[in-house]
Image: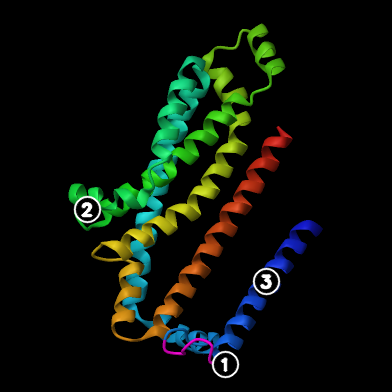
């Protein structure tokens, strides 16, 4: 608990330090206020932003694409990772393919995704799934591989069938690694979805940022970015809490 409070305190102090430096830079005129409004101006624009129905609709569109991408990538990667991790001779060739795909950045596939899926939500979801699938898959494979040999031998000596071994041995052993992968993938997925919106989409928070920028409402554009950052922190906190609860529960079993 003390370590967690220390981390939170350091995070708050770090955020305040960044805001202070930001305010000083703008106040001294090192950067034009037209390009970088002060944090006070951005904070003052937040109420108007939150009252804007267009912002709410755009945020819902972005989070909807993020959620669908997370579900598709997580479920498919966990299922495939369980199979690969259990069937040992599949691990080596599977990792070669996964590492080859990981070397291709998701942003490079956006033009191809636009051609295949158009500018709708399907395009954003497809790119986000590609971006996070390998991460969850690798964590699942390593989680399955981390089973204790003594427990495997004990399960065999008790003549557990495949389902019993999976339910009482493989899944509990792999769960901590899986939930960690999902937590890390959540942040990456949100960034990728917004990036695809900035580069080519019909709707979403990225489009709203561009619209504010084109209307020369730079303060509103930064307020929008700030609001997205707050949402990202909330999502991370929720998933981190779920991860801790899951791991604590596994340890009690």
Q: Residue at x 40, y 34 (%)?
A: 100
Q: Which residue is mark 2?
A: 114
Measure the alpha-carbon separation of dots 2 and 1: 42 Å
Magenta segment: does it hold 83? no
Q: Residue at x 47, y 34 (%)?
A: 78
Task: Locate residue 144 relative to residue 128 in the image: left or right.
Answer: right
Q: Which residue is mark 1?
A: 27
Secondary element under disc 3, as helix, strand or loop, is: helix
Q: Which residue is mark 3?
A: 14
Q: Locate residue 201, reporting x and y percent.
A: 25, 62
* Quarter of the view holding residue 150: top right
Measure the alpha-carbon separation of dots 1 and 3: 20 Å
> The magenta stretch spans which residues?
29-34
| Image vertical order of residue 170 relative to residue 6, above or below | above
* Quarter of the view holding residue 215: bottom left
Q: Residue at x 58, y 44 (%)?
A: 180
Secondary element under disc 1, as helix, strand or loop, is: helix
Instruction: Indicate which label's residue lies in the foreground, 2 or 1.
Output: 1
Q: Locate residue 21, reporting x and y percent.
A: 62, 81
Instruction: Please tell me which of labels 2 and 1 falls first in the chain.
Output: 1
Secondary element under disc 2, as helix, strand or loop, is: helix
- For the stretch drawn in magenta, the main secondary structure is loop
Q: Residue at x 50, y 66 (%)?
A: 231
Task: Locate residue 8 relative to residue 223 in the image: left or right.
Answer: right
């Amino acid at each position: 608990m003390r370590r967690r409070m220390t981390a939170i305190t350091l995070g708050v102090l770090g955020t305040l330090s960044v805001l202070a430096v930001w305010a000083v830079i703008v106040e001294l005129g090192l950067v034009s206020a037209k390009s970088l409004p002060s944090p006070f101006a951005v904070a003052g624009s937040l109420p108007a932003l939150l009252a804007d129905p267009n912002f709410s609709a755009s945020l819902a569109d972005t989070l909807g694409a993020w959620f669908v991408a997370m579900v598709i990538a997580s479920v498919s990667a966990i299922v495939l990772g369980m199979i690969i991790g259990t069937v040992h001779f599949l691990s080596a060739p599977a990792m070669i393919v996964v590492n080859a795909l990981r070397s291709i950045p998701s942003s490079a596939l956006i033009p191809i995704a636009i051609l295949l899926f158009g500018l709708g939500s399907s395009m954003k979801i497809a790119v986000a799934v590609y971006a996070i699938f390998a991460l969850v898959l690798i964590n699942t494979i390593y989680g399955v591989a981390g089973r204790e040999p003594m427990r495997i031998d004990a399960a065999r000596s008790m003549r557990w069938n495949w389902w019993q071994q999976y339910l009482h041995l493989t899944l509990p052993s792999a769960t901590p690694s899986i939930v960690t992968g999902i937590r890390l993938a959540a942040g990456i997925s949100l960034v990728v979805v917004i990036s695809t919106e900035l580069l080519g989409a019909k709707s979403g928070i990225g489009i709203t940022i561009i619209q504010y920028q084109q209307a020369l409402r730079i303060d509103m554009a930064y307020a929008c970015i700030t609001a997205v950052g707050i949402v990202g922190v909330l999502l991370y906190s929720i998933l981190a809490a779920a991860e801790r609860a899951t791991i604590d529960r596994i340890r009690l079993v």
